[in-house]
Image (tube, rainbow, N blue to C red):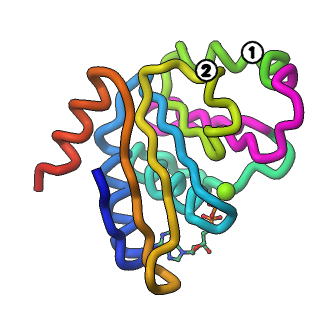
């Protein structure tokens, strides 16, 4: 599924809608180059999940935890050099825990992420504030979410 977001306002609407739909155990992978809008999207998804804290790009931490309607585990593996760093953090527990995982640069750790996931590739569009989303994934939750997202 492809979605075009014409500006920040539309990104906010989409992110919040997605955030409201997410459920315990959902794994959301965000891919796209630097500045594509992965962290911005995460902020809006967080709002939809009822996170009141301000979500930022984790500078040193690979995983930041927030609490909203559900726990939100925000991964940013851009600086990950060695998979062992993630094993040391017990990252698997987050995937099978009681919250939602949102993973920036998920492509970098593709094989470490459970197959059942929602993947959003973000790319810059024609104008500075336009973004093209390509949504794919695998599993029942992915199918349900696509149905819900396309419902007006
Ligand atoms: N429609 C849009 N959706 C997302 N970000 C946008 C949009 N239009 C402009 N931007 C800007 O693009 C930048 C994206 O940065 P960021 O979210 O940190 O990217 P990433 O995490 O992918 O490196 C932000 O400055 C944001 O304000
Ligand atoms: Mg980022």
Across and down, in percent, residue 92 comes to 65, 15
Q: Is residue 59 left or right of residue 6?
A: right
Identify the residue at image location x=52%, y=84%.
Answer: 128
**What's the residue at 59%, 56% (across, down)?**
32
Q: Which numbered disc covers residue 90?
A: 1
Mark 2 sits on what residue? Answer: 94
Q: Where's ligand 2: which quadrant? A: bottom right
* Residue 77, horizontal then vertical, whole percent: 74, 40
Figure label count: 2
Horizontally, residue 121 falls left or right of residue 149, namely right
Q: Is residue 72 magenta?
A: yes
Out of 54 and 26, give the one closest to the viewer: 26
Label 1 neighbourhood size at 10 Å, few (<14), some (14-19), many (20+)? few
The answer to the question of whether label 1 and label 2 lie on touching residues, with beta carbons closer than 8 A, is yes
Position of 78 compared to 119: left or right?
A: right
> Residue visible at 51% across and 64% down?
123
Magenta residues, start to end: 62-85
* Position of 114 relative to 23 (above/below): above
Vertical placement of residue 33 versus 151, above or below: below
Residue 54 appears in which quarter of the rendering?
A: bottom right
């Amino acid at each position: 599924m492809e979605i075009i977001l014409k500006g920040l306002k539309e990104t906010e609407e989409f992110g919040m809608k997605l955030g409201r739909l997410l459920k315990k155990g959902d794994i959301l992978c965000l891919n796209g180059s630097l500045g594509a809008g992965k962290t911005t999207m995460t902020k809006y998804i967080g709002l939809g999940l009822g996170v009141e804290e301000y979500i930022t790009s984790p500078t040193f931490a690979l995983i930041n935890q927030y609490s909203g309607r559900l726990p939100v585990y925000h991964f940013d593996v851009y600086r990950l050099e060695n998979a062992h760093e993630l094993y040391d953090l017990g990252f698997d527990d987050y995937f099978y825990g009681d919250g939602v995982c949102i993973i920036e640069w998920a492509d970098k750790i593709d094989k470490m992420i459970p197959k059942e996931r929602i993947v959003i590739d973000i790319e810059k569009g024609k104008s500075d504030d336009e973004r093209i989303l390509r949504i794919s994934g695998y599993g029942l939750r992915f199918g349900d979410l696509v149905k819900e997202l396309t419902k007006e």
